[in-house]
Image: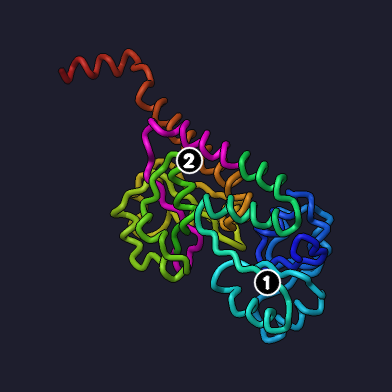
Amino acid sequence: MTTHCSRIVCLSTETAETLCLLGEGHRIVGFCGSADRLPEAQHKKPRVSIHGVSRIDRICALEPELVLGFGEAHGETLSGLAQRGVAVHLFNQGSVRGILDMIRVVGAMVGREETAAHFAGSLEWRVEAIRNRSAHERRPVIYFEEWDQPSITASSWVSELIAIAGGVDCFADLSRYSRPEGRVIDDPDEVVRRAPDIIIGSWIGKALHREVIEQRSGWGMIPAVRDGEVHEVPASSILQPGPAALTDGLDALHRIVELWRERRTRIFHTPLGPESVEAAEHVA
């Protein structure tokens, strides 16, 4: 049945992006979330919401043959749609392996198994190439913040991508919680104590303001703040567990880590000038 679905509603952007990358974007009749990662042809299509009492009626009005959702937040909506006879599928990927599997499943749903398998395989290859490139390098400690009020740290797939990119998620112990409230940093001083070398912000829906982070009480002593290692990764590139996270998101993380290593190398290999040599000899 699903291989012939011509009308699909995507309640999360990663499935919409996957369909477009597989050449099946024409099947999308509505989607939820940002259109930043989607081709321009998708931008005029109806936006749907999982919030509000009329959400199921509005989705049904699009006459979907299949509705794709993600995570616990979409469960109730998909249940209501199923009760009206709409075919639904709830994904719950929270890892690199889960993202690759999601791509393959979406491909199978639209009769593009081979294309999806090839695409997922190419993504897996580049993930492993980046992982291997950083395997024997110094690994900076990274604090990733996906929201600032309250401070919420990295989800499971972001934490995994940090490790693949060559870093160490300083709150990896919290990444196992799928719900954002489980990843809230109640005590800002805990970030100070964990002393990250790099801070990465990815605030969904708004731009990162570095000065807000740098001016937090006591954060001036954090190595990342002291050394100017506060960076931003666009939320659309990493906060959705889909192709974007394995391409632009991972690339951005790896680039930040590589630049950090280059700066550390320059610091420790800067030749001493005559005055520095003379001062060192005097101390000796």
Judge the density around disc 1: few (<14), some (14-19), many (≥20) Cα neighbours within 10 Å.
many
Q: Three-letter amino acid code at disc 1?
A: Val
Comparing 270 with 88, the one in front is 88
Locate residue 153, reporting x and y percent. Answer: 44, 59
Can residue 225 be seen here? The reply is no
Reading the image, the residue beneath label 2 is 165
Locate residue 166, reporting x and y percent. Answer: 43, 39
Residue at (37, 45) in percent of width and height: 141
Please tell me in which quadrant of the rendered image residue 92 appears. Answer: bottom right
Please tell me in which quadrant of the rendered image residue 205 appears. Answer: bottom right
What is the secondary structure assignment of the residue under circle 1?
Answer: strand
| Residue stretch in magenta | 123-151
* On screen, residue 151 above or below 236: below
Q: CA distance from mark 1 to mark 2?
A: 34 Å
Locate residue 131, reporting x and y percent. Answer: 47, 37
Q: Three-letter amino acid code at disc 2?
A: Ala
Reading the image, the residue beneath label 1 is 88
* Residue 64 part of the magenta-drawn span: no
Task: Residue lying at the far bottom in this picture: please name it.
Answer: 53
Comparing 133 with 154, the one in front is 133
Can residue 50 be seen here? The reply is yes
Please tell me in which quadrant of the rendered image residue 267 appears. Answer: top left
Say which mark, if any, is on residue 253: none
Locate residue 157, reporting x and y percent. Answer: 49, 54
Task: Residue lying at the far front in this picture: please name it.
Answer: 1
